[in-house]
Amino acid sequence: MTATRTAPDAGALALRAGDLVEVRGEAEILATLDERGELEGLPFMPEMLAYCGRRLTVHKVAHKVCDTIGRSGMRRMERAVHLTGARCDGAAHGGCQTACLMYWKEAWLKRVEPGDPPERDAPADPAAAPPGAAAPERRDGSFAALGALGSAVPAGPAPGRRLLPLIEAATRKEPGPDGEERFSCQGTEMLRAAPSCLPLKDVRQYVMDVRTGNAGPLFVLRALLIGLFNRVQDRSRKLPGWLRFRDGMRWGFVAGRLTGPTPGGALDLRPGELVRIKSKAEILGTLNQDRLNRGMGFDEEMSRYCGRTARVLSRVDRCIDERTGRMLTMKSPCIVLEGIVCAGAYTVSCPRAFIPFWREIWLERVEEPA
C-alpha cells in the first residue's frame, strides 16, 4: 500500500494572487515527494522541472477545483497555487495539447521579495528569461500572442540535466486492456489530490476567493448566485415540465437542437488569423442534444465569449482523457484562441482557467483592421 506524503502546516506561506515566489530546486522538491512522485496525492510532473529556480507570480490560489472527471462539483484543494505562465506543454505526456495551468504545492515554493537576489543561476523574473523560457500570460490566466501553444512554457531542462526518474515513471498508468498507452498527470489524478467535495453552502470558499485576491467581491457574489440558481435548476428537472423554468437549464442556457449527425465546417485556420466567435444561436444550431458537435462540447462558460473577436493561437489535435488517461486524437483539429480562457464565472469562481477548444464551424474569419 502506498503512503501519501502530507505537507506540514507549519511554515505555510499563506500566498495571495500577485505574490512573488521562487520554485525550489530539484533536490528540495524530491524530498517532499512520496514513492509515486506525489505530495498529498498531487503529482509533480516532468514538465514542471524547467521552472526550478525560476521566479514567478502567483496567478491564483488553488484552494478549490471543479471536478471534470466525476462531475461532482467543486473539490477542496489544500496548500496549492497556480503560477502565472506555468502551463503544461505535454512534453512528457505524449504531446498532450490541453495546456493545463499546473498546480504547485506551497512546499515546492518559497516566498521572495522583488529586490531579493536570486539564490540560483536563473532569470529573476519571466520577462528576463531567454526566448521561449516563460509565458507572457495575462492576469486573467489567458495567453498573449505566442504563435504556438507549446511556447507558453520553458523549453525544458538544459542538455545533460537529469530528469527525476521517479516522476518520469509516474507519467504512465498501467496499459489498457488492448495494450493502449495510458497517461497519468495532475488532471487524471485530481480526485486523489482533492479528495473531498466542497459544498456550495460552504461560505468560507467565497471569503477565501476575495481574501486571496482570486476575484473581486462582485464577481464572487455573482458566481455564488449563479451557483444557487444552477442548484435549483438541477433539482427542478425532477418536476413536471410545466413547473420548470426554461426546462431546468443551467445559467447560460445552452441546449443543442439537432438529432443525428452534427455538421462540420473546415476553415483551415492558422495561428495569427483574426476570427469572430459566432453568435450563441448560430452555435446552438450545430449541437446535438448532448451539446456536442462531432464529439466536442460547447458549454455555458464558452457562451460568454460569443460575438468576441480573437486571434488564433494554435491548432489542437490531441489531448488526454482525464477519466481514462488515454490519448484522444481528433479527426479534425480544434482551435485555441488567444486571450480566451474559462474564468469560472458560471462555475463558482473555479481558478483552473481551462483553455477551451473551438470547432471551426463556431468561428468566422474577419478582416484585419485598417
Image (spheres, helix red, strand yellow):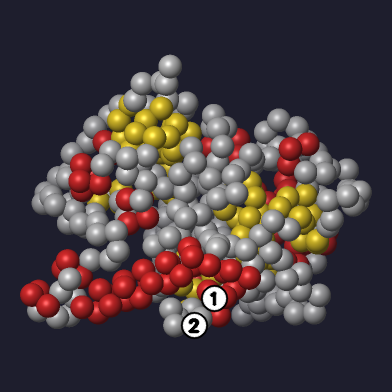
Q: Residues within 10 Å of mark 1 (few under 14, many from 20)?
A: some
Q: Residue furthest front?
A: 218
Tag 1 residue: 205
Instruction: Find residue 245 and report its horizontal and vertical position in percent.
Output: 17, 71
Q: What type is the residue that disc 2 sits on?
A: Asp
Residue visible at 18% across and 53% down in the picture: 256
The structure residue drawn at horizontal position 12% and vertical position 78%, both measured from the top left corner, is 243
Left or right of 114: which side holds 334? left
Quarter location, residue 294: top left
Q: Position of residue 153 (x, y in %)?
A: 64, 42
Q: Quadrant of residue 15?
A: bottom right
Q: Secondary structure at mark 2?
A: loop
Residue at 61% in and 43% down:
137
CA gap between label 1 and label 2 equals 6 Å
- Comparing 294 with 21, the one in front is 21
Which amino acid type is shown beneath numbered disc 1? Answer: Gln
Does residue 310 show up?
yes
Which residue position holds label 2?
202
User: Is residue 46 visible in the rendered structure shown here?
Assistant: no
How busy is the neighbourhood of tag 2: few (under 14 within 10 Å), some, or many (20 plus)?
Answer: few
